[in-house]
Amino acid sequence: MALLPVLCYPDPRLHKVAKPVAKVDARIKKIVSDMADTMYEAPGVGLAATQVDIHERILVIDVSDNQDELMVFINPELIWASAEVKAWREGCLSVPEYYDEVERPAVVRVRAVGLDGKEFEVEADGLLSVCLQHEMDHLQGKVFVEYLSMLKRNRISLRMKKRAKELVGQR
Ligand code: K1U
Ligand code: ZN
């Protein structure tokens, strides 16, 4: 088991745009395995490679009740989004202990490549839809707090910087 350090907002590396994966080889499989370990340990229901400072289009998600249904999305693409929108209280491992409501399309259809190197499509609603959109934003360098007001974002940045200093002080 290998745990990867998760970047915390407002780290500028969270704003890098991830590059497509050319081939699902042993290196990519090791990244996926380490990302899954990191997500389950956190715990979280999703993780984008950007959050662990790997700027390639890779996501892991597990929204199952028992956290035993890992989904891997390589080179995910949004191919359809519903006109209907829904607000959801989101969290992020890169913005610890902060949750806020974001409105997004209620249903999405995503095309991606799996660990077997084969293309697949999934239509998602509920938490899977929210999570897919949240994680695909990470790959574009966007963190969910960017949907919030500038006032909230500034407060969150200060809070995260204070938290990081306190954690260093505890070492
Ligand atoms: O940092 C991330 O991108 C992961 C994030 C995914 C997410 C959750 C909820 C709405 C949108 C996106 C998280 O996993 S935050 C932690 C969390 O929500 C959770 C943790 C354990 C059990 C259930 C939920
Ligand atoms: Zn996140």
Image (cartoon, rainbow, N blue to C red):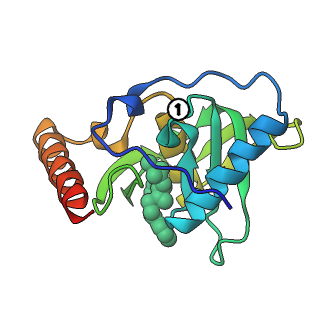
User: Does residue 107 sit above or below 23 in this rendering?
Assistant: below
Q: Residue at x 64, y 56 (%)?
A: 2
**Residue 47 rendering spot, x and y as whole percentages:** 55, 50
Q: Which residue is at the far bottom? A: 66
Q: Secondary structure at mark 1?
A: helix
Q: Is residue 112 left or right of residue 103?
A: right
Q: Nearer the viewer, residue 102 or 151?
A: 151
Q: Which residue is mark 1?
A: 139
Residue located at (72% from left, 36% from top): 74
Is residue 89 positioned above or below 23 on the image?
below
Q: Is residue 135 left or right of residue 168?
A: right
Q: Position of residue 130 (x, y in %)?
A: 50, 51
Q: Position of residue 78 (x, y in %)?
A: 62, 32
In the shown orientation, is residue 135 left or right of residue 151? right
Instruction: Examine the rendering and report whether any part of residue 61 can be seen.
Output: no
Instruction: Please rate how many residues cluster around mark 1, counting C-alpha atoms within 10 Å: few if below 14, some from 14 to 19, many from 20.
Output: many
Instruction: Indicate the quadrant containing the N terminus: top left, top right, bottom left or bottom right.
Output: bottom right
